[in-house]
Image: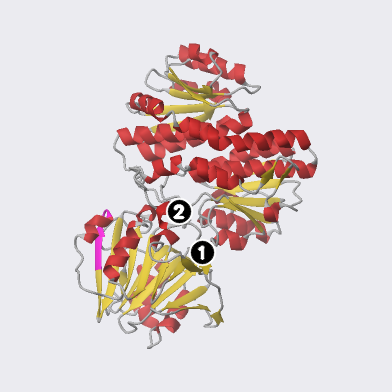
Amino acid sequence: MCGIIGYIGHRNATDVLIDCLKRLEYRGYDSSGIGILNKKLSIYKEVGELKNLEKKLPRSLQSSGIGHTRWATHGGVTRENAHPHLSCNKKIAIVHNGIIENFRELRTYLEGKNHTFCSETDSEVVVHMIEELYRGDLEKAVRSTVEKLKGSYALVILSQDDPGKIIAVRNESPLVIGIGDNENFVASDIPAFLKYTERVRYLHDGELCVLTSTDTKIFDLKGKPIKRGVETIKWNLEDAEKSGYPHFMLKEIYEQPQSLSRALMDRVSEIDPLVRLNEFDNADIDTLTLVACGTSYYAALIGKYLIEELALIPVSVSLSSEYRYFGVKDGMVIGITQSGETADTLGAIKEARKYGCPTGAITNVAGSSITRLTDSVIFTRSGPEIGVAATKTFTSQVLVLFLLALKLGIAKGTIHGDEVRKYVSLLKEIPVSVEQVLEKEEEIKKIAKWLKKYNNVFFIGRGINYPLSLEGALKLKEISYIHAEGFAAGELKHGPFALLTPTSPVVAIVTNDLTRQKMLSNIGEIKARNSPIVTIADENDREVEHFSDFVIRFPSLPPLVSCIPISVIYQLLAYHVADLKRCPIDKPRNLAKSVTVE
């Protein structure tokens, strides 16, 4: 949720911290702060965007420091609640991502020991507990402190009395170590320090790292050393930058032909025919549950249609936050999460493992928590996604789920040679189909200019286009702040019809499936209530024009495949509505990219 950075090395720490925080601001932008060490520990914090902090910083030289961008959980958006937090003696500072569940109990104990608190946050108890337990050995005080914590945390600690080191420790919140030359980094996400190094060591749950300018040492919480190799990141800084686009979201929309091609690479063959999915190649699945949150949940709902259609395997789809507490845990469980760090999805997988369920993951991030938690993993290969609203990771998730459906169908004998070849050929057309949709941007922008004046928009579809409508509504609401809802078109007469007025436009998907005529009837019924209609239709479908105020066409593809180019239409529509309304597209209010706390 929040963004964390720590630096120790030969550069000016203030400059490095601010530079790195700019690449983490998508993780939280309510407030920001840094702590720098130059004989004395100094803290600087400001509410609002990072530029507010940057204006207040001194230009003196420092060799180590910690920084934070906050997404508020405990306590309001105030300077006092911003990180870093300081000990009473002003010698220890911490930054924290996560939730300390027993903070009230710890705070009461510490206040009884005459500690004075300056914030409303759960995080501040950590720095006071370290101070309370410090006896000249910072690592020991940190280990003793985290033993008392319940909840999730990624912590980075700086001490005036230990100037040559930074301590990092994690449990259920991500931290990664960046290995430089005579400098080292720790961050909540790789893009923070990718400008400076491509070499990383991943910190796992229940591990502590001591960073100096020349070394990084990892220990368990008993102080036992852990050996872990250095990995090299395969994407570069340019991948994580805007590259001339006005927003990360638009850049990432336009990267989809490449990200989809990477998702397919080396995984399909028309000649054999076969689908390769590494650890899933030998998976024997009779029943399947997909767990996910937000956009990934809608990808999972699309996956249900694909897998049940192609493999005839019953699929349940659950919100991770519900699955972990309710319902039957049985069969294989696959968690879908772009970051691999989504707290509820990790919790759902852990719950499934308690019941002996085989587990898998579909994720974008190698080395993320879910990759170490599950039995098997499929990577989406989307590259870094900075915009809070998921775009290329969503379409890659859907494509990977299509591959999984084909793989399972081949294994179950529900689809065979020529049919597999047909689908593989269609999947290979998807990157080109997406490029054709991107060429319609100006046409979509004109419709967005018309749509932006409305306060309520409804999205409808049938079959696989129903969850796609839910995703289209989510995209519009999260970045343009227009109230939007998605519905199964057949459900309109069961309540939503009451909301139809001339000021409530409807966006409808019409594809050439077995419900096409029903869908046209639904649109006709909506038109009779004087609601404006935007129809997303096959390029060869002329009948829809009689029912529609606007038509946006996608390349002619079978319904199971067309969901990917249609989703790109929705992304561009939402983007341009938000842009025309001058909304902060990459940083929508109250939202953050990766939800790492429950």
**Which contiguous range is marked in magenta?**
44-49
Does residue 349 appear left or right of residue 412 in this picture?
Answer: left
Colour scheme: secondary structure
Depth check: 162 or 274 in front? 274
Quarter of image, res 278: bottom right
What secondary structure is marked by label 1?
loop
Does residue 231 appear left or right of residue 571 in this picture?
Answer: right
Q: Amino acid at mark 1?
A: Glu
Q: Which mark is residue 594?
A: 2
**Residue under numbered circle 1:** 172
Residue 491, percent across and down?
A: 56, 25
Front position among marks 2 and 1: 2
Q: Amino acid at mark 2?
A: Ser
Does residue 66 appear left or right of residue 421 in this picture?
Answer: left
Residue 571 in sight here: yes
What secondary structure is marked by label 2?
loop
